[in-house]
Amino acid sequence: MSHEGEVKVTVRQVSSLLPHEETIGEQVDQVALDIERSGVQRDPVIVDSDRGVVLDGMHRIAAFRKLGFQEVVCSPVDYSSSSIGLHRWARAYAGEAAKFIEVARSAGFWSSKSVTKALSSLDRREHPALVMTGGECLVPREGATLAEGLSMVRRLDEASSTSGWRRSFVPEDEIDAPLNDGAMVLLLQRLGKQDVVRAAVSGQLFPCKTSLHTIERRPVGVNFPVAELGGGAESALRARLSKARRRLLPANSVYEGRRYKESLMVLDFR
C-alpha cells in the first residue's frame, strides 16, 4: 500500500469491492468509453478499508467490470472516522407540476405539510422521503419504512423516464435553486453509515445517487495507465506515486470541471 501524507492509494481486486448503490447505464457506458479513450484511471475509487464497501466510484467500478479489468486503483479510508461525511443527493425533476403531484400521490405521497414541518419530520425519521414543488410539500404516511421510501424513489424515477421529465441531482443543501426554477424535488431521509454498509453487504442496493460522501484530502489525479493493471500493478503504482507532486486544494475548489465540497489532494505528474 502507498501512503501519500494522510492519503492512502492502493490496488484492489474489483471482485472484492461492494457497491451500495445502483448505477445509471448510460453513465457507465460513458465512463467505460472515457477509460478506453484515455487509457487511464483518472481518480482512485474511495472504499471502506474494512469491508471494501464502495463509497464513491460506483460507475467507475461498473465500467471496469464491463471492460473486463480484474483490478482497480482505490483509496481505502476508515469509514468510522468523522472525517468521512455522509450527506444526501436530492432529485430534481423538470416537468409538469400537476402531473408530478399526481404520480407522487399514486406512489404513496399523501399528507401535505409545510416545508419546515416536512423537513423536520424527515430529520426525525417519521417519514422516509418527501417531495416538494414551489407550492406543495407531500410526505408518505407516518410509519412508512425506508424500504417503502426507496420504492417510491424508483416509482418517480420510472415516471420521469416515461414522461420525459429531465432528472438531475443536487446536493441536499442546494435544493432551493431547482425549486426556484420550477422543478419538483425529492429528498430521502438521512442515512446512517450503517445503512450504507448494510445495503452493500446484503446486495439490496440503494437507487443511484442516493448518498453523497465527502472525504477530507480526497485523492484525485492519479491517472494510472489501465494497461498496467494486473500482475505487478501495486509496484507500478508505488513507483508512480513516488514521482508525484502533491497539491492540496481547499474545500469548494473546482477541479476538472467539478466543484468539490471537501479538500483535495491532487497527485500531479506534470
Image: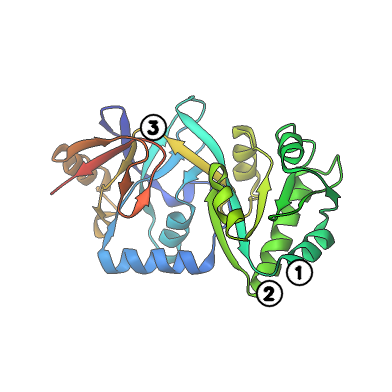
Check disc 1 and give the amino acid type. Lys
Residue positioned 83% across, 44% down in the render: 144
- Which of the marked residues, 1 or 2, is nearer the chain's N terminus? 1
Using residue 52 as the reference point, say whether residue 264 is left or right of it: left
At numbered mark 2, what does the secondary structure look like: helix, strand or loop? Answer: helix
From the image, state whether disc 3 or disc 2 is nearer to you. Answer: 2
Residue 52, x across and y down, in percent: 49, 40
37 is higher (above) or lower (below) than 64: below
Residue 31, x across and y down, in percent: 40, 63
Residue in the foreground of this view, choosing between 31 and 126: 126
From the image, state whether disc 3 or disc 1 is nearer to you. Answer: 1
Check disc 3 and give the amino acid type. Glu
Residue holding disc 2: 163
- Which of the marked residues, 3 or 1, is nearer the chain's N terminus? 1
Using residue 159 as the reference point, say whether residue 178 is left or right of it: left
Using residue 216 as the reference point, say whether residue 171 is left or right of it: right
Q: Residues within 10 Å of mark 3 (few under 14, many from 20)?
A: some
Residue 53, visible in the rendered structure: no
Any mark on residue 56, and which? Answer: none
Residue in the foreground of this view, choosing between 128 and 64: 128
Residue positioned 35% across, 46% down in the render: 44
Residue positioned 60% across, 58% down in the render: 92
From the image, state whether disc 1 or disc 2 is nearer to you. Answer: 1
Residue positioned 85% across, 39% down in the render: 143
At numbered mark 3, what does the secondary structure look like: helix, strand or loop? Answer: loop
Check disc 2 and give the amino acid type. Ser
Residue holding disc 1: 99
Residue holding disc 3: 216
Q: How many marks?
A: 3
Residue 199, x across and y down, in percent: 64, 44
Disc 3 and disc 2 in contact, CB within 8 angstroms? no
- Which of the marked residues, 3 or 2, is nearer the chain's N terminus? 2
